[in-house]
């Protein structure tokens, strides 16, 4: 049988509010199996964690001030857009402050510590389902040099975020150099394909991920490039 | 039934050489269905198109010269690494010149026109299988701000590379702004998850992609950000 992966939308979740038990709500609606990766979008994590703030949607200066409050550094400005480095270390538009799919007059901030959010959801899923799964908290970011946005991982639990193939040999015996694959970002992107298809679905299960990629790790520590290491800040 | 997607490795392909009929070799080994997206890694496209050049693997200056020959612009240098803009418009390390998984003493250059490569493979798959599929030619690139590499699309045929959700409304009636999802890159990343799992597999089929994403488009035109539009060059 060829290597295969499936990505399944978790449908029927209610509107999420502060204090909601995301793991419980997911476990009730998904038939989880050991080795699944559960991808949860930032928006519902922020809602459950109470990371909502009041904002006048028509007041651009207020939105801008909110983005700057969440930032440690401004990389670029163009018109209404600011590209910032957030307190969590992410480089993204408007510090990830998001006004879509939230109640009118509110904005969702990024989770304070998305790796911790992922660990909590993972612990909750284990308790509710008895399954050993990994969790990725995802968000939609733009990139340098390429148009369009893609989903990436803000946090993870139970996975090695970057799989290091350095030192392994390719099919011709050559030692591979610098092939460190960011599998958590690829998993977030794969999940987005079913979330975008079934619009409004904030959770998906990725089944069939290579078992050797499971383990310890943190997006903050393993994926976010520190300021001094980065060639583009 | 929930929205779902599957990603299936195409196994058993032989070593590819100049002039090989990739579409024929893939069609013999994959049970294609209408609406599938066939993801083909750049390496075998370059081999089939004869984009191999001789290079001394131990001579760093020769490799550097080759990368510069393929570039229109150098963005950054650090040690042995150069980040360039290639003639095809991609920003990547060493102009995408690749010495892994190629015969010793050779290097693979990027396809001259990866969208054209994708169209040819798509036409060949239609002729061989009778199926209407889309094709993505993928490669593994690094990114700004985040560690690790992910697979992205170099070229595509039969898909709208960026799906524009601007003007549509979210679940709360708010008009979404700037939600243009680069689905070809997400499809390339999803495919990499099975290629990385089954090492040495250069082709995967992504099944279940939203049908409204099929259509006309080009990575060069729709994804590659022109020099003047980019905030990070």
Image: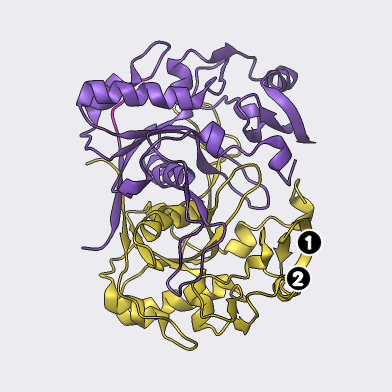
Chain colours: A purple, B yellow
Q: Left or right: A213 with respect to B32?
A: right
Q: Left or right: B30 with respect to A103?
A: left
Residue at the image point whose x is 55% and y is 75% from the top? B116
Which range is magenta?
A10-15
Q: Quadrant of residue A170?
A: bottom left
For marks 2 and 1 on the same chain, the one whose residue lies earlier in the sequence: 2
Q: Left or right: B24 with respect to A60?
A: left
Q: Residue B158: give its label.
A: none
Measured from the top left, where is residue A88 in percent x and y? Answer: 60, 26
Q: Quadrant of residue B127?
A: bottom left
The secondary element bearing badge 1 is classed as strand
Q: Does residue B37 appear in the picture of this structure?
A: no
Subunit ID for the residue under disc 2: B
Q: CA distance from mark 2 to mark 1?
A: 8 Å
Q: Identify whether B25 is placed above or below B167.
A: below
The secondary element bearing badge 2 is classed as helix
Q: Specify whether disc 2 shares its chain with disc 1.
A: yes
Residue at the image point whose x is 36% and y is 64% from the top? B204
Residue that badge 1 annotates: B74
Measured from the top left, where is residue A155 in percent x and y? Answer: 48, 31
Residue at the image point whose x is 30% and y is 70% from the top? B11
Q: Residues within 10 Å of mark 1 (few under 14, many from 20)?
A: some
Q: Does residue A53 appear in the picture of this structure?
A: yes
Q: Quadrant of the N terminus of chain B?
A: top left
Q: Identify whether A53 is placed above or below B228.
A: above
Q: Left or right: A181 with respect to A83?
A: left
Do the residues under discs 2 and 1 have CB atoms within 8 angstroms? yes
Residue that badge 2 annotates: B68
Measured from the top left, where is residue B156 in percent x and y? Answer: 51, 65
Which secondary structure type mostly characterizes the magenta part of the structure? loop
Residue B159 is one of the magenta-drawn residues: no
Give A118 or A79, whichever is nearer the viewer: A118
């Amino acid at each position: 049988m060829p290597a295969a992966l499936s990505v399944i939308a978790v449908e029927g979740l209610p509107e999420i509010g502060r204090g909601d038990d995301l793991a419980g709500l997911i476990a009730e609606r998904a038939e989880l199996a050991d080795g699944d990766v559960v991808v949860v979008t930032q928006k519902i994590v922020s809602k459950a964690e109470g990371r909502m703030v009041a904002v006048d949607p028509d007041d651009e200066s207020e939105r801008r001030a909110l983005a700057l409050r969440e930032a440690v550094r401004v990389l670029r400005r163009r018109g209404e857009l600011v590209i910032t480095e957030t307190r969590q270390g992410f480089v993204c538009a408007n510090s990830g402050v998001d006004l879509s799919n939230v109640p009118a007059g509110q904005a969702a901030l990024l989770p304070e510590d998305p790796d911790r959010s992922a660990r909590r959801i993972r612990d909750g899923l284990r308790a509710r389902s008895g399954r050993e799964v990994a969790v990725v908290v995802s968000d939609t970011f733009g990139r340098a040099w390429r148009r369009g946005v893609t989903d990436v991982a803000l946090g993870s639990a139970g996975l090695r975020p970057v799989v290091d193939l350095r030192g392994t040999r390719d099919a011709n015996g050559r030692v591979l150099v610098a092939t460190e694959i960011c599998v958590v970002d690829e998993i977030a992107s794969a999940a987005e394909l079913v979330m975008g298809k079934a619009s409004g679905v904030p959770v998906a299960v990725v089944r069939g991920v290579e078992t050797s990629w499971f383990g310890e790790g943190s997006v903050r520590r393993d994926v976010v490039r520190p300021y001094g290491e980065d060639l583009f800040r």
